[in-house]
Image (cartoon, rainbow, N blue to C red):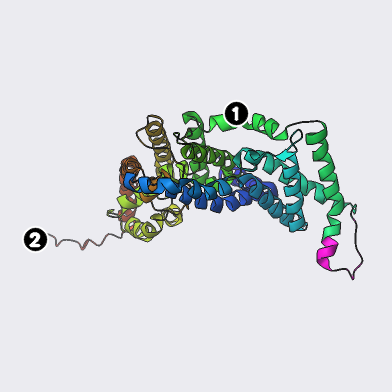
Amino acid sequence: MTGVARGAFSSALASFIENDTLAAIRAGMVAVVPLTIVGGLFTIAAYPPAASIDAVVAAYREVLLVPVRATFGMIGLVACFAIAYDLGRRLRQDALSSAVMATVAFLLVQLDPAEQTLALDNLGSSGLFTAILVALVAVQVQRFFTGRGLVIAMPDGVPEIVAQSFLSLTPLFCLVMVFWLIRSVAGVDLNSLVQTAFAPFVFALNTLPGILVYACLVTGLWSVGINGDNALDAVVAPIFFQYLSANVAAVTAGQPPPYVTAFGFFSTFVNVGGTGATIALALLLLRSRHVPFRKVSRMSLPTQIFQINEPIFFGLPIVLNPVFMVPYVLSALVLTTASYLLMTSGMVSKPFVNLPWTTPPVIGHYLVTGGDWRAAVWGVASIVIAMLVYLPFVRRAERRAIGVTMATVPDMTDNRAAPTQKS
């Protein structure tokens, strides 16, 4: 691919990634992260890793699990509100009205026509795809009505907050009417339909081939300078959140977590010290024979402890660098495969606690699995394995860099002509 073609491809992909809809979905997924972190902390408190503490906590377990159910049980509802708010803001609508209309429509979809009660389970992660769909539809309906003037406009003297509430009246009525007809009159379970439509994707990402394809896409995009995690987050985050919620539900029910690739698997077990396990590369370059490599390593290591690897990624660089792009992708594939197999065999616990992505490696391995010491050991081993993957490529890069440096150093040898020998 020529430089012009590569630039055009990157520009087109970046435009696709940054479109308003995907950006709003990403914002909604980010909005629910604090819920899962708080819920995860209470999960650890309810099921501490030490048996002696667990015996004491057992009497208070049901009380400790209340925040877990409250946080994980509202993921879908909060995501719907946040996505609609962000998309409404991007499309120059009244964002609060967008969020309120979408939330009302989402709750209407979750009503059981026979019982006339809310299906509370669908307010959590099981209703996440429906929440996304309803939020996007609600804002587009609002945009349609306001763009064509099909709204109730109040006189200038009316307070803005009152005027905005009347502006949202006709689109809200339309949304309520449509979703009421679908759910209560026609009896269509929209949540079930959406779940069925996304079932192949939900299944695939918990398989080894599926998660390997994802790992390859993430690191491949990063290799050409595009944030692969952000690019795919709008698509995969709802699925990983569903896995995480299912794992939390299983743990609270006293059962083993069913999903390997729940939210936290990739960020903790694959992105060790940053995407592509680049903390291993930084450790190798710490004593490099090439001085610039050592400087980049020393500059990047403090941030990589907290999973931030931009200094080494762009400073070395890895992006568009054929020597380092290969191990960058390969290390992610190796760690994905090994971690997946260890978890499916039961040698390492599956993740069920969500942590901030800046949690240092090893510590993150331990906490995300609810205090499994074997996961912490595997975290150390992961760094060593990644170092072995990077090692031959580091040596090659050093030889090339040192060779180029030597070739550019002027020859300082004394070239004065030797005195002619006397006859």
Q: Which mark is residue 151?
A: none
Q: Residue beneath label 2, please?
A: 422
Q: Position of residue 404 (x, y in %)?
A: 34, 52
Q: Which residues are magenta?
A: 152-164
The answer, for residue 389, to whether it is visible in the render is: yes
Q: Compared with residue 203, is residue 293 higher up or lower down, i.e. above or below?
A: below
Q: Residue beneath label 1, please?
A: 200
Residue farthest right in this picture = 155
- Local packing at callout 1 (Cα closer than 10 Å; few below 14, some 14-19, many 20+) is few
What residue is shown at x 14% (from left), y 62% (from top)? 419
* Tag 1: amino acid: Pro
Q: Is residue 85 left or right of residue 275?
A: right
Residue farthest front in this picture = 59
- SS assignment for the magenta stretch, majority: loop
Residue 2, by quadrant, is top right
Q: Compared with residue 270, is residue 20 higher up or lower down, i.e. above or below?
A: below
